[in-house]
Every structure is written in C-alpha cells, then in structure tokens.
Amino acid sequence: MIHTTSAPDKGVSFGATNAVFIGRSIRLSLRNTEALVMAIMLPIMLMLLFTYVFGGAIAPGGEYVNYVVPGIILLCAGFGSSSTAFDVAQDMTNGIIDRFRTMPIRSLSVIIGHIAASLARNLMATGVVIGVAFLVGFRSSAGLLDWLAAIGIIALFILALTWLFATIGLIAGSPSAASGYGFILLFLPYLSSAFVPTTTMPHWLQGVANNQPITPVIETIRGLLTGTPIGNSAWLAVAWCIGILLLAIIWSVIAFNRKAGRR
C-alpha cells in the first residue's frame, strides 16, 4: 500500500536516510566485482596501449606517458561513472522505487546514494590508475597543493559526470537503453586534448575539441601535475563542471518527480 502523506516522517532525518542508501549502493558495487574490475582495468589497458604501442610514434623521446596520463584519468572517471546510469535505470524499472515510496523516507535518496557511492568508487579507481601510471614511467613535478588542487578538480568532474549519468538513468526506458545513451559521453575524451594536442587535428575539428568541457579539465590536471601552462583552463574547467552539475541536479529532480512521484 502506498502512503499518501506529502512529507516524510520527521523522525527519519535526511542525513540518516542518505547514509543508508549510500551504504546500500556501496554494497551493490562491491558485489558487482566484474564492473568494478573493468572500470579500473580498461583505462589501465588503454594507458599501456597508448604508452607502449602508440607512444613511440607520437613522442619518440618517451615523454608521451606524462602527456597521456591526465586523459587516462578522466577516461577512467567516465567509465566508472557510466555504470551509475545502469544502476539508476535498474532501480527505476524493477519496482524497488515503489517499495521505497511506502516508507517514511524521501525516495530520491536512492539516487543520491548511487551518486555518492560512485564518487567514492571512482576516486579509488583513479588512485589505482595513478599508481600504475607511476609504474610505467609517469613523473610529476607537482607539489602538495598542486596534487590537492588536481584531486579537487578530478572529484568535481566525477561528481558532475556521475550526476549526469544518474539523470540519464532516470530518463531512460530501460537499463540497456541507459547504458547506450551514456556510452555517447565516453567518446568526448577522444575529441579533446587527452591523447594528442588539438593543434594536430583538422581545423574544423579543433573548434569542437577546444570548446568542449573535457579539454579544459584535462589541461588543468596536466598543468597541475606536469607543470605545463594552464592559462584560463582552470576557470573554464570549474565553470563547466559546476554548470553540468547544476543542470544535472535540476534535470534529475524534474525527471524523478515525473517518473516516481513527489513525496
């Protein structure tokens, strides 16, 4: 039986509800070990491929690993965040949201749980990728503050991208459709400065590569970790991430209320 009250029980705090759903999403992630392993292994395999197969042709001096690591970090974040679309779509279609609506809680917390768990999972995966990067020759000139700033930018990017993937999961008709829509976003790093400078691209493509959100994020991380010029990339990166995050939050609330009903 579905409750018809318009407000949750005041005895159940919003923070406690979110903590329960974050724990639920983390447990689901740990049980889905194949997805977790692939989210880490695929970027590592791409890093090895670009470093040892293409790196010699792109930069014969062997310094390509320092160039490509920031792009691999964002690629790792994208792969890891994309599973959120599938998880959210699965919750929206398997009836569990209706079950949560019978409880004195805000059912939107289930989405927040997925996002928080994805942020934690992807930061851990990013740490593993950076560790492997050092093993294959990556060397950073960054100090402590540079590393903290880089981690902050990476975390903000993961949060914005994860919330966007969660919104895709909300509007998709099925988990498989959510995976398909989300896959389109994973191509953005290939159309940026992640793997080659944008100046090497055709002129018409440079406009796309230089003015999409991934490029300033990568240039900021690259500049912080390896000392290359950042210019105005840092401000553009923060602006892009906050803009995407705000858009995703508003869109997700509208989509959730439309599909699951307001509590």
Image: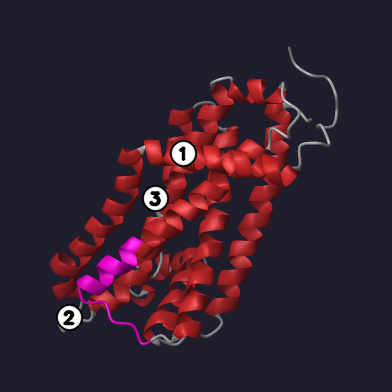
Amino acid identity at mark 3: Phe
Determine crowd level at label 2: few under 14, some 14-19, many 20+ residues with C-alpha closer than 10 A.
some
Rendering quarter of residue 10: top right
Q: Earlier in the sequence, mark 1 or mark 2?
A: 1
Question: How many callouts does the rendering have?
Answer: 3
Q: Which residue is mark 1?
A: 27
Amino acid identity at mark 2: Gly
Distance from the alpha carbon under mark 2 to that under mark 3: 27 Å
Amino acid identity at mark 1: Arg
Q: Nearer the viewer, mark 3 or mark 1?
A: 1
> Over which residues does the magenta segment extend?
128-141
Residue farthest toward the top in the current orientation of the protein: 1
Q: Which residue is mark 2?
A: 62
Determine crowd level at label 1: few under 14, some 14-19, many 20+ residues with C-alpha closer than 10 A.
few
Determine crowd level at label 3: few under 14, some 14-19, many 20+ residues with C-alpha closer than 10 A.
many
Indicate the quadrant containing the C terminus: top left, top right, bottom left or bottom right.
Answer: top right
